[in-house]
Amino acid sequence: MPRVKRGKIALKRREKILKYTKGFKWGRKSKERAAKEALLHAWTHAYRDRRVKKRTARGLWQIQLNAAAREHGLNYSKFMHGLKKSNIELDRKVLSELAREYPEIFKEIINKTK
């Protein structure tokens, strides 16, 4: 019976896992079982935090808009209510960018919402 060399696919799978754990601490970068466990947690956190990033960004935009609106004598809630009443459909991301980069345009928007 001829000799059979095995493990090609298993080796590729292990190498693939260890490729993803490059930069991890201690045995989590070099030992297959620890690396697999580390990846399960890492990918779970990465998936969750891509959504959390959106939440924190929206909170930051709200803080920036509140600060910019208060410079012109409005608070955040009255500013947003004025936007809805005057049918200005700009989202918070764009509005906060306008407040930071183009204050003269933001001032015109504030005047339309009053």
Image: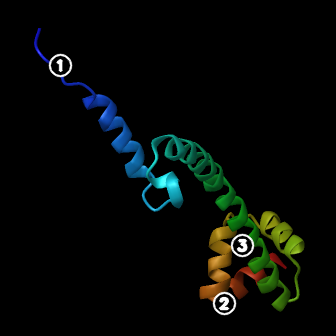
- Cα distance in 3D space between marks 3 and 1: 63 Å
Asked whether disc 1 touches disc 2, contact meaning CB atoms under 8 Å apart, the reply is no
Q: Which of the two marks, 2 or 3, is nearer to us in this view?
A: 3
Which residue is the extreme one toward the top?
1
Q: Which of the two marks, 3 or 1, is nearer to us in this view?
A: 1
Callout 1: SS:
loop
Pick the residue in front: 60 or 90: 60
Q: Is residue 88 above or below residue 17?
A: below
Mark 1 or mark 2: name the one nearer the start of the chain. Answer: 1
Pick the residue in front: 62 or 86: 62
Q: Is residue 63 left or right of residue 29?
A: right
| CA neighbours of label 3 inside 10 A, class few (<14), some (14 to 19), many (20+) | some
Residue at 72 percent across and 60 percent down: it is 55
Please provide percent x and percent y for residue 68: 77, 85
Asked whether disc 3 touches disc 1, contact meaning CB atoms under 8 Å apart, the reply is no
Pick the residue in front: 74 or 29: 29
The quadrant holding residue 9 is: top left
The quadrant holding residue 71 is: bottom right
Which of the labelled discs sits on residue 4, or is there none? 1
Mark 3 or mark 1: name the one nearer the start of the chain. Answer: 1
Query: What is the three-letter code of the residue carrying label 2?
Result: Pro
Query: What is the three-letter code of the residue carrying label 1?
Result: Val
Please provide percent x and percent y for residue 18: 40, 48
Q: Which of the two marks, 1 or 2, is nearer to us in this view?
A: 1
Check disc 3 and report the residue beneath it.
Answer: 61
Q: Is residue 110 left or right of residue 9?
A: right
Residue at 64 percent across and 55 percent down: it is 49
| CA neighbours of label 2 inside 10 A, class few (<14), some (14 to 19), many (20+) | some
State how many labels appear. 3
Check disc 2 and report the residue beneath it.
Answer: 103
Q: Is residue 61 above or below residue 3?
A: below
Q: Is residue 108 above or below residue 9?
A: below
